[in-house]
Image (cartoon, helix red, strand yellow):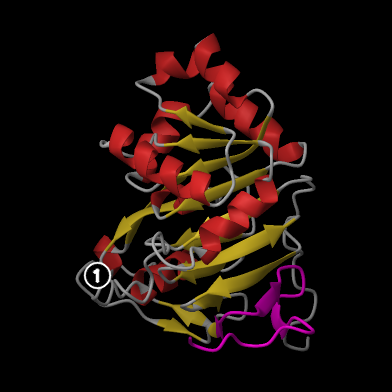
Amino acid sequence: MAKNQHKPAVPVRRAKGRLLIIGGHEDKTKEKRILRELADRVGAGKLVVATVASRQAKDIWLEYRKIFKGLGASNLAHLQIEGRADATAEKQLGILRGAAGIFFTGGDQLKITSELGGTPVCAAIQELYDEGGIIAGTSAGASVMSETMLVSGASDDSPRIGEMVRMAPGFGFVRSFTIDQHFAERGRMGRLLAVVGQNPKYLGIGIDENTAVLVESEERFRVFGDGAVYVLDGQDITGTNFAEKEPARTMSIYDVKVHVLSDGDAFSIQERRPFRLEGRRRRKAA
C-alpha cells in the first residue's frame, strides 16, 4: 500500500462558532493586534472575561476590562467561579446569557476544567460556541480548548519514557489536535513530540507567545502574530520506544512531520497541509 493512502479522517466538529487560541503573553500595550481581533469580532455584543484559571482574578479582570474598552468592546462582563457549586448558580449563568464571546485568561488549566467540567456553566459555554459565538483563550485558557489537554511536561529537556507528559480531558471545542503554548519561549518541542507519539492520530499545535490561531469549523486555521505556530503531524510515524520498560531512557520517535507557520499562513486540518492565504503579505516591522 502506498504511503499516506487510506489515512483515517480527522474528526470534524460542526459548530458554528470560532476559536481564537493564543500562545500567551499577547501584546497588551502597543498594537494589541490579537486582542483587537477578538474585540472586532464581538463588536457591540457581550464579551465575557473568564478568570477561572487565575488566583489573581480581580486584578486580571480589571486589566483586560481596560484593554477591551480601549479597543471598542464596551459590553463586558466578568466570570469568576469559586468552586463547582458556583458553576451551577443562576448568577453565573446570567453572565453568559446572550454573550457573543468568552475569553479565558491564563493561569492553571486544571483549575478551569476541574471547576467547570460537566456543569451548567460549561454547557452554556458549549452552547455559545455551537450557536456561532467566539471562544478565545490565552496560555492555560488556550490549552483547555482541545479534547485531550496537555497539563504538564518537562520544558527545555528531552523527555524520558517514564516521565514524558501529563494529560487530562479538556473541553473538546477542537478534537483534532492538542495545544501547547509559550512554545518556543519555554522550549516545549520535546513534550509536544511526546504527545503526538503517544497517539499519532492527533496533530500537535505549539503556539509561540503573542501569536494566535483562528480556527474555523475545525476544517482549517489561520495564523497571525509575531511568532510561529508549529504543527506536528505524526500520522506517518514509523516507530517509537514509548512502550519499552526503561523509564530512564530518552524518547525515540521516527518520521514525524513538522510544519512551521507564521503570520498569514494557514493550515487545512482535513488535508493536514499548510498553505498561504491569498492576498496576504507578511507584515513589515514599523
User: From this viewpoint, which residue is outermost toward the top?
Assistant: 90
The structure residue drawn at horizontal position 31% and vertical position 39%, both measured from the top left corner, is 54
Q: Which of the 4 image quadrants contains residue 152?
A: bottom left
| One can see residue 53 in this view | no
Magenta highlight on residue 273: yes
| Main secondary structure type of the part rendered in magenta | loop
| Mark 1 closeness class: few <14, some 14–19, many ≥20 residues within 10 Å | few
Relative placement, left or right, of 157 versus 190 is: left
In-front residue for pair 245/158: 158
Q: Residue, x 27% and y 77% (percent of image)?
A: 158
In the image: residue 123, left or right of residue 228: right
Identified at 70% across, 31% down, the residue is 127
Question: Does residue 95 appear to the left or right of 222 in the view shown?
Answer: left
Check if residue 261 falls in the magenta segment.
yes
Residue at the far left in the pictured view: 248
Amino acid at pointer 1: Glu
Q: Is 143 on the left-hand or right-hand side of 187?
A: right
In terms of depth relative to the viewer, which is nearer, 242 or 16?
A: 16
Quarter that holds the N terminus? bottom right
Quadrant in the picture for residue 221: bottom right
Give whichever of 42, 270 is nearer the camera.
42
Q: How many marks?
A: 1
Provide the residue span drawn in magenta.
259-286
**SS under mark 1:** loop
The image position of residue 84, as x and y in percent, is 41, 19
Q: Looking at this view, is 125 or 8 the one in front?
A: 125
Q: Quadrant of residue 155?
A: bottom left
Q: Is residue 177 visible?
A: yes
Which residue lies under the disc numbered 1? 246
The answer to whether 214 is drawn above or below residue 59 in the figure is: below
Residue 136: image location, x then y, percent:
56, 49
